Amino acid sequence: MNRKPDYSTQKQLPVLFGFFIMGFVDVVGISTSYVKQAFGLSDTLANLLPMMVFVWFALCSLPTGLLMRRTGRRTMALVSAAVTAVAMLMPVASYSFVSFLTAFALLGIGNTILQVSLNPLLTDVVEARKVTGFLTLGQFVKAVSSFLGPVLVGVAASRFGNWSYVFPVYAAATLLFFVWLYATPVAETRETGTAHAGFGVVASLLRNRQMLIWLSLIVLIVGFEIGLMTAVPKYLEERCALPLEKGGLGCSLYYAARMLGTFAGSFLLVRMSSRRFILFTLAAAMLFFGLFMLAGSVWALMTGLFGIGLMCANVFAIVFAAAIRSDASKANEISALMIMGVAGGALVPPVMGIIADAGSQWSSLFVPLAILTYLWAGSFQAIKK
């Protein structure tokens, strides 16, 4: 006799807390500026940190999804917590550039496993009719975590004199997630099929031109955000002589705008088409980006940055949803492919670092501006309604 699924809040809360842990990956943006300052690095070398994080999304997403068929979603989420906790303790054990590179590589691996496992795990603790709402709530929780990261780093640097004190806090929160989820039994839906079949489906998807456009948009929106967040503290220091402790709050302002944009988008997208919405917001984002590059005062720069975060908040979700809706029978494989696109965060910062070393932080901003232009043009064809 099958038992009735348990959709209690007791089972939902630890899974939702996992989205908070997922947001830790965004601390790499502000960390890059502090690591560059601490070890006297060039922008090219410092910007290897985001690459060490996001390259694992390309390498580990599909293998994680296939391994999850055997081990289960909850088990993989627990593995991700263990890897993330180790990553967060490494800068505490050894304060060196190599230690930070290793820590962020492990953070990337742990976050990849978490993103692949946590979204489907949420469907096991939530009624089918509420899944979309809870997924949106999960993204909001992740945005809160992303917003708090630069704030905590700034407090650690200004109040306690060491910005890296944020990592023990992150390690403690990750261990709490591990214990909480471990103590929470979940009746999972197990997938069937072989790994060979899964690879075959993904290979067929990569031959689909429309799917490649969606993937390129995912790659570039993630690369855009990570590249911008890597540059913001250094750009504000260059443009307005703001110290890193204050310049880093620009990243928090961006994530605050993204939180607000996600919240507003959940209502607006019910009333207007996704295509119309994304084309309007990306056009507005380009205007705000122009303000961010041309303004001379701190307030004008921050206004531009806030507008960019607000207007770009829903791009990832709209593109992801469009790809998933294209073929419901291959939703798992499409999801894994789109998550692989998060590796875009590894591609853009190194390019921006090379340009910054050759010119300035301002000149490196033409890279994310070009990405915004491509996103707007690509959305004409990729988003149908």
Image (cartoon, rainbow, N blue to C red):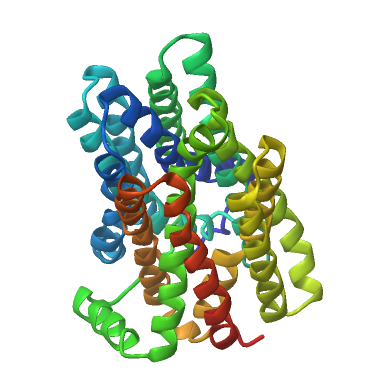
Residue 341 position by quadrant: bottom left
Task: Report x, y in % for residue 377.
Answer: 55, 80
Q: Residue at x 48, y 86 (%)?
A: 327
Q: Quadrant of residue 256?
A: top right
User: Which residue occupies 34% across, 53% down?
Assistant: 355
User: Is 192 above or below relative to 59?
Assistant: below
Residue 185: in sight, yes or no? Answer: no
> Percent from the top left, x then y, of residue 165?
41, 17
Image quarter in which the C terminus is found: bottom right
Which residue is most to the right? 271
Q: Is residue 376 above or below residue 84?
A: below
Mark yes or no: residue 101 visible: yes
Q: Nearer the viewer, residue 206 or 172?
A: 206
Residue 308 in percent (x, y) is at 63, 55
- Horizontal and vertical percent for residue 120? 46, 61
Give the residue drawn at x 32%, y 31%. 36
Horizontal placement of 15 versus 300: left or right? left
Q: Looking at the image, how many numbered discs can be counted on the residues?
A: 0
Q: Nearer the viewer, residue 254 or 140?
A: 254
Of all residues, the one furthest to the top in this rendering is 160
- Could you tell whether 205 is left or right of 7 in the image? left
Decide which of 367, 383 is in the foreground and name it: 367
Above or below, 99 relative to 370? above
Closer to us: 257 or 284: 284
